[in-house]
Image: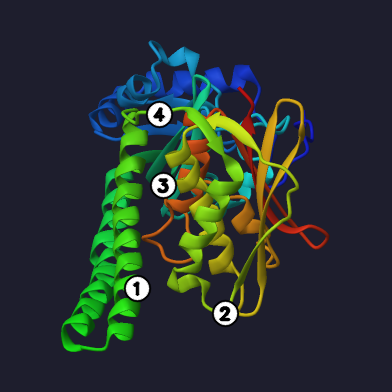
Amino acid sequence: MPLKKIETYFAPAERADQALVEHDYKLFTGFSKVNELINALPLIAAVLNEQRQIVYGNKPLLEAMGFSKFEDVLGLRPGELINCIHANEMPGGCGTSESCRVCGAVISIQDCLNSNNKIVNECRITAWQGNKTISYEFEVTVSPFQYEKQRFVVLSFEDISNEKRRQVLERLFFHDIINTAGGLRGFIQFLEETDDPAEQKEYTKVAARLSETLIEEILSQRGLLAAERGDLVVNFAEVDILNLIKEVIQQIQHHKVSEDRQIIKASTSHGIRITTDAVLLKRVLVNLLKNAVEASLKGMEIIIGVKDDHPDGIEIWVKNETLIPKDIQLQIFQRSFSTKDETRGTGTYSIKMFTEQYLNGKVSFVSNEKERTVFSVFLPKN
C-alpha cells in the first residue's frame, strides 16, 4: 500500500507505519552484537529507517534526551527527539519545514540515503527546553547500513558546542580586541609625540572612544557567557527609550563600520519610557544597528525608530536597504551562524537570547522587496 503524500518543503514527509517501525526495532533488539556495538559508543547514536524514523538507539541517546525506555522514542525523527523548534511546523514533522532545507542533520541523512556513502557534517539546532530555547551544535556522522535486505542509516551526534565557543572567543580576543587595543596604543603614541594642543585634544577623543569600544566588546562577551549559564543578573528600572537610542547611534557612529553610512533616527513626537534593563537593551540595539550598518553598502541609509501604538508594549525597529538571502534568513538566530566569518556568529543569537529570555520581549524580522530588511524588538509595558 503506497504511503500517503504529505506536503514538504524539503525531505520526504511520508513515514513507515507503526507496525513496520516495531518490526525493524525487533530486528535490532534480537541482534545481540548490534546491541553491544551501539551501546559501546560514547556518542549519541541511532539507527534510522529510510523514512528517517528512529528504529533503534543507544543508552547515551536515551540518557541525553531524558527518556527511560526506548519505546518512548520509537518512530520519532531526530528533530522530534531533540524537540527542535521547527519539528512541528509542518504536518510531516522533522525534515519538512522551510528551515529544514538548511539543517545539517537532515541534509546529511538525505545525502547518505541518496549516495549510499558516509556523510559528515556540522549541524546547528535550536530546541525547546520548557518554555525557553537552547542551542545545540553537533558534528553529525551518517553511515549507510543494510540488514535483512532493508536499508538503514546509523546516525551519531558529537557535541561540538565548546569547540565553537572557543573559536568565537579566539576570534574576539585574537582579532577584534587586539585590533582595537592596537588602535588605542597607536593614538596614545601620537599623544606622546605631539605638542600641538588641538592634535592632543583630537587624539584623546579618539583614544577614549576606542577604550570604550574595547570595554564594550569584553563586557558583551562576558554578558553572553553569563546569560548562557543562567547567571546573568537583570536590573529593571524606568528607561527613556529615545535617549537610549541616541546613545546607541553615537556609539555606532564612532565605530569604524559606520564609515560613509548614514544612521537616521526616525522622528518621534513624544518621550517614551518603559521599565526594562538599560544595559541589556543597549547591547541588543547596538548589535542590531551594527549588523544593519555592516550589511549596508557605502552611501546607504540605516534608520532606527520606535512604535508606541500597541497597548501592551513598544517596538524598536532598525531598517536597512540590503535584502537577506532566503537560506540565510532561515538560520539568522542560530548560535555560531554568521555571514561574515565561520568563527563569528553571536550577534543575532545574543539579540534573541537577551530579548526573549531576559527582557521578556520578542525579536522578529522581515526581509523582502517591499519592506526591505527590518529587525524589530518588541518590549512589554510593565
Alpha-carbon span between mark 2 and mark 1? 18 Å
Local crowd at mark 2 within 10 Å, few (<14), some, or many (≥20)?
A: some
Local crowd at mark 1 within 10 Å, few (<14), some, or many (≥20)?
A: some
Front one among 135 and 49:
135
In the image, 82: left or right of 328? left
Query: Does residue 62 appear anywhere in the picture?
Result: yes
Marker disc for residue 260: 2
| Disc nearer the start of the sequence (2/4) | 4
In the image, 94: left or right of 259? right
> Which marked residue is nearer to the observer: mark 4 or mark 3?
4
Q: Label 1 amino acid?
A: Val
| Disc nearer the start of the sequence (4/3) | 3
In the image, 54: left or right of 336? right
The residue indicated by pointer 1 is 206
Alpha-carbon span between mark 2 and mark 4? 36 Å
Q: To which quarter of the image does residue 350 belong?
A: top left
Q: Label 2 amino acid?
A: Asp
> Which marked residue is nearer to the observer: mark 3 or mark 1?
1
Query: Does residue 334 appear anywhere in the picture?
Result: no
The residue indicated by pointer 3 is 143
Alpha-carbon span between mark 4 and mark 3? 46 Å
| Disc nearer the start of the sequence (2/1) | 1
